[in-house]
């Protein structure tokens, strides 16, 4: 891995006070654990802020499924979603999806404030537009939208995502995992949904940012070591930054 980093050119991005390092991967790939370790490591260089850029609506639905009433609500949401895929997404449904998506926009805006203050930024997840509707992509793009209101929301959402993705990370650590390992770590997740996310992860790109692929089925110590090597190479570029 060290040889890979030597051959990969890292440099301080013009006008940027401190780096943005993104950690991406499906649920069960170990993002939270790696983020915690990298936050401590990066803080040894300079003030660092960890920003979660997911919507976390999945966590809400999993919490709902733990209770009888919540299961009914979750079932209703699933039925509405299936109906929307067949008949098209109407304005009211699109608005709910848009509001959920805006949670990421708000979090990204908060991240931008810390970045302007000169904090090094570590992110759990990062917005992308390569795969709309999945893995931190815009919700409404490439969907069948049944009315003008839904289409307007789609255009606005896509515009906002393009603005976010224009802010390129200095490096992306992409954690790759197989379905069996991921499901063993996240047994409360739906197997099929998890499998789909895992298949999408290798397709993601982030506005030309360098991507370091890490096999997160390896022992944690090895995963952390590989992540540290990549992060150190980037942090070294900003040693003299204010």
Image: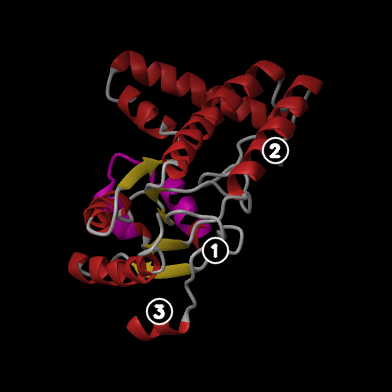
Q: Which residue position holds label 1?
A: 209
Q: Nearer the viewer, residue 241 or 59?
A: 241
Prevalent SS, magenta region: helix
Q: CA distance from mark 3 to mark 1?
A: 14 Å
Identify the residue position indicated by label 3 in the image.
Answer: 5
Q: Position of residue 205 (x, y in %)?
A: 57, 60
Q: Quadrant of the N terminus?
A: bottom left
How far apart are the two marked residues, 2 and 1, measured between alpha carbons? 20 Å
Quarter in which the C terminus is drawn: bottom left
> At 60% across and 64% down in the image, what residue appears?
208
Q: Measuring 44% from the left and 39% from the top, which residue is drawn there?
A: 111
What kind of element bears circle 1? loop
| Residue 156 % position (x, y) | 70, 31
> In the visual, does 72 lie left or right of 143?
left
Q: Earlier in the sequence, mark 3 or mark 1?
A: 3
On the image, the x and y values in percent for residue 65 come to 33, 25
The residues bearing labels 3 and 2 have C-alpha atoms spaced at a distance of 34 Å
Residue 108, image x and y in percent?
Answer: 49, 38
Vertical placement of 219 versus 101: above or below? below
When asked about the image quadrant of residue 74, the answer is top left
Res 86 visible: yes
Instruction: Categorize mark 1 by other alpha carbons within 10 Å: few (<14), some (14-19), many (20+).
Output: some
Question: Residue at 27% across / 44% down in the picture?
Answer: 187
Alpha-carbon neighbours of circle 3 within 10 Å: few (<14), some, or many (≥20)?
some
Pointer 2: what residue? 159
**Which sits in the foreground, 155 or 170?**
170
Per the image, is 185 magenta?
A: yes
Left or right of 120? Residue 81 is: right
Q: Is 208 within the magenta?
A: no
Which of the two discs, 2 and 1, labels the residue nearer the N terminus? 2
Image-based side of 226 in relation to 76, left or right: left
Magenta residue span: 180-200
């Amino acid at each position: 891995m060290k040889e890979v980093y030597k051959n990969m050119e890292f440099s301080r991005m013009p006008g940027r006070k401190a780096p943005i390092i993104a950690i991406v991967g499906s649920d069960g790939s170990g993002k939270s654990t790696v983020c915690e370790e990298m936050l401590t490591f990066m803080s040894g260089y300079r003030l660092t802020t960890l920003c979660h850029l997911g919507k976390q609506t999945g966590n809400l639905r999993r919490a709902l499924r733990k209770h009888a009433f919540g299961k009914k609500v979750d079932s209703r949401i699933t039925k509405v979603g299936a109906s929307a895929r067949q008949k098209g997404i109407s304005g009211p449904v699109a608005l709910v999806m848009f509001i959920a998506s805006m949670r990421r926009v708000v979090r990204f805006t908060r991240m931008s404030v810390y970045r302007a203050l000169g904090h090094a930024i570590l992110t759990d997840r990062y917005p992308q537009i390569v795969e709309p509707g999945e893995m931190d992509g815009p919700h409404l793009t490439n969907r069948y939208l049944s009315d003008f209101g839904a289409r307007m929301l789609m255009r606005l959402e896509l515009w906002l995502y393009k603005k976010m993705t224009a802010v390129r990370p200095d490096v992306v650590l992409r954690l790759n995992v197989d379905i069996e390992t991921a499901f063993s770590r996240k047994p409360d997740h739906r197997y099929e949904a998890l499998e789909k996310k895992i298949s999408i992860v290798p397709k993601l790109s982030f506005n030309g940012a360098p991507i370091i692929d890490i096999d997160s089925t390896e022992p944690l110590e090895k995963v952390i070591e590989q992540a540290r090597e990549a992060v150190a190479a980037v942090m070294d570029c900003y040693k003299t930054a204010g």
